[in-house]
Amino acid sequence: MDLTELKAAVCEANLATVQTGLVMATFGNASGVDRETGLVAIKPSGVPYDRMTSDDMVAVRLDGSVVDNHYKPSSDLDTHLLLYRAFDGVGGVVHTHSTFATIFAQALTPIPCFGTTHADYFRGTVPVTRHLTEAEIADSYVASTGQAIIDAFAGRDPLEVPAALVAGHGPFVWGRTPAEAAMNAHILEECARMAWYSLQLRPDLGSLPVALRDRHFLRKHGQAATYGQETRA
Ligand SMILES: O=C(CO)[C@@H](O)[C@H](O)COP(=O)(O)O
């Protein structure tokens, strides 16, 4: 993918977060990486979405050095870069302040897998990160946010649960492409909304049985060998 195509895909993912109601004002940001060239394109900082074009996307290398600088890159750039460097296979990252996911993040409450809507896209609980230390906030706030997400995924496959709730802040969501990351952000918000209402009805609700969760996740994302006949039906 050349840089022009990457910027177009990233611009589209940014606009999708507005169209799906996840983002207001200039909150949020989406980015994408081309693993062959090591180039990342990301939303420019503070540019209104209704004026944003793909030419405005800022290109940087995975080490953070800026390739073109018509605008400043998003203030969350270093979080995106840490995730790309740590999570192989991730090609797009989206950050929003979508209402229900942010409510869970502010309440430091992970989103358990309560139903198959969640299980189709997230194989288990969406975790909440630890709070950053005062030193991290002072010295390396944005990179430490990325590190806290990475810490929350120790021993887990980030492509099986492609989202984290940053404590007191909001969701970061990813996918194989910028478009997939934007779609996962939309689905996360819907799952958070359903989880919130489920907990109103039943505060002691437990997670979906693992067999049912995995049946749903794997038939959408697993190997054909596992559920071959039925997957094709
Ligand atoms: O997390 C936040 C604000 O708390 C971000 O979503 C910013 O509001 C977006 O900033 P830019 O990407 O425009 O720099």
Image (cartoon, rainbow, N blue to C red):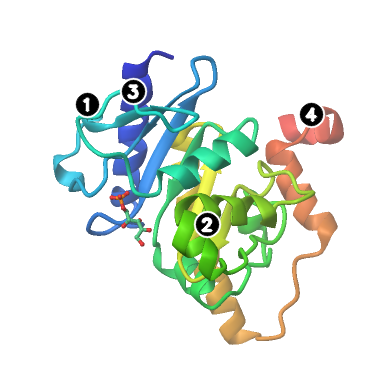
Please, what is the three-letter code of the amino acid marked with disc 4?
A: Ala
Residue 67 disc label: 3
Please, what is the three-letter code of the amino acid marked with disc 1?
A: Asp
All told, the count of numbered labels is 4
User: Pointer 4: what residue?
Assistant: 224
First-in-chain label (3 vs 4): 3
Left or right: 70 with respect to 187? left
Q: Position of residue 147 (x, y in %)?
A: 60, 51
Cβ at disc 1 under 8 Å from ligand 1: no
Please, what is the three-letter code of the amino acid marked with disc 2?
A: Leu
Question: How far, Cα to Cα, is label 2 from label 3?
Answer: 32 Å
- Closer mark to the observer between disc 1 and disc 3: 3
Disc 1: CA contacts within 10 A as few (<14), some (14-19) or many (>=20): few
Left or right: 196 with respect to 204? left
Q: Residue at x 76, y 48 (%)?
A: 156
Residue 17 seen by the camera:
yes
Residue 183 seen by the camera:
no
- Specify the quarter for ligand 1: bottom left
User: Pointer 2: what residue?
Assistant: 188
First-in-chain label (1 vs 3): 1
Please, what is the three-letter code of the amino acid marked with disc 3?
A: Val
Task: Tell me where residue 11 sits by quadrant.
Answer: top left
Question: How far, Cα to Cα, is label 1 from label 2?
Answer: 29 Å
Q: Residue at x 49, y 65 (%)?
A: 101
